[in-house]
Amino acid sequence: MLNGAMLVWFLLTGASVSFVVWDSASNGVTSWVQRMAWILVTVYTGPVGLFFYLTTCRRPFPGGHDRFTRATWKQGVNSEMHCLAGDATGIIVAAILVHFLALPNGWDIAVEYIFGFVSGLFIFQALMMLSMYGSYSQAVRKTFFAETVSMNMVMTGMIPTMVLLAAAWPESEDPLSPTFWFRMSLATIVGGFVAYPVNYWLVANHLKHGCMTLPGADGPAPGNGHVSSEMDGMSHGEMEEMPGHSMSMKTLPLHSMFLWVLGTYVILLIALFVTSRVTPIHF
């Protein structure tokens, strides 16, 4: 039965990825980093990724992208895609490597966290914000907080799912087995749902950007694509209420950022502790 379910899943994933790749090339009006993020997320999450791509990011008609993606919940989904794509890519690459190193699962988790964080921050977050902040080092510094709290929540969902499923399907630890990729798909989906609330909060409080239309790609786009043409004539207050489109991002006080980061680490450690009560984690 599992083999049949995996076959259906992989067929749906192939069709979903094909559509997102085609649509990104022919109908995309966002940056190449954001398009790549959606493609990778769809590779990892199949029809689930396609569903959210269609409902939160795809341009419905020429000139309609900004208005279609304006809702805060859609901005939160698009904001999370950069983190989820980068983190999941790093985690999956690390999971492949540690399998052949035959490390205890505790070290597996540590290596996967490091790979996920590096991939998420230095590739998908910093590159996405490079044009806004002017330099790569500035982009890394400005996105460090958002990536850390988002990454911790992605890991809170992914790692327990990976560990528990690996115990149930020992063969799924082998990257050459289809169950490995099915397990990673399920873990990425769980990680995405767990990390969504903090990404929604980040976008709603102007601490992280959401979906941004490229300048000139979907009609007039002043402000380097971060302010849509539909905002013409709107008051400054109205523009500030539209997350993901304002050029000005807020910054939390240092002590607040520290508490948020600490809180997400505590949540992650609690999730790992609970998981270890079911499936032992060894170093």
Image (tube, grey):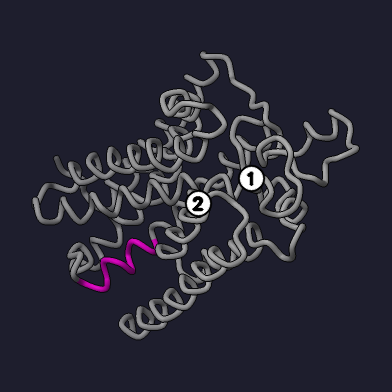
- In this rendering, would 277 be left or right of 58? left
- In this rendering, would 34 be left or right of 224? left
The rendered magenta stretch, by its main secondary structure, is classed as helix
| Crowd rating for badge 1 (residues with CA inside 10 Å; few <14, some 14–19, many 20+) | many
- In the image shown, does 216 or 164 lie closer to the viewer? 216
Looking at the image, residue 101 lies above or below residue 178 = above
Callout 1 secondary element: loop
- The image shows residue 9 at horizontal and vertical percentages of 41, 77
Task: Specify whether residue 131 is painted magenta.
Answer: no
Quarter of the image containing the C terminus?
Answer: top left
Callout 2 secondary element: helix
C-alpha gap between disc 1 and disc 2: 11 Å
Q: In which quarter of the view is residue 266 placed?
A: top left
Sequence-first disc among 1 and 2: 2
- The image shows residue 223 at horizontal and vertical percentages of 70, 35
Looking at the image, residue 189 lies above or below residue 145 = below
Residue at 16% x, 50% y: name it.
98
Label disc, if present, on residue 32 of the rendered structure: 2
Quickly name the residue at label 1. Answer: 212
Q: Amino acid at mark 2?
A: Trp
Looking at the image, residue 280 lies above or below residue 184 = above
Residue at 51% x, 55% y: name it.
35
- In the image shown, does 122 or 172 lie closer to the viewer? 122
Q: Amino acid at mark 1?
A: Met
Residue at 46% x, 44% y: name it.
83
Q: Hey, which residue is sitting farthest left in the picture? A: 101
Label disc, if present, on residue 276 of the rendered structure: none
Magenta segment: 177-186
Residue at 24% x, 68% y: name it.
169
- The image shows residue 19 at horizontal and vertical percentages of 52, 73
Task: Specify whether residue 180 is painted magenta.
Answer: yes
- In this rendering, would 194 be left or right of 78? left
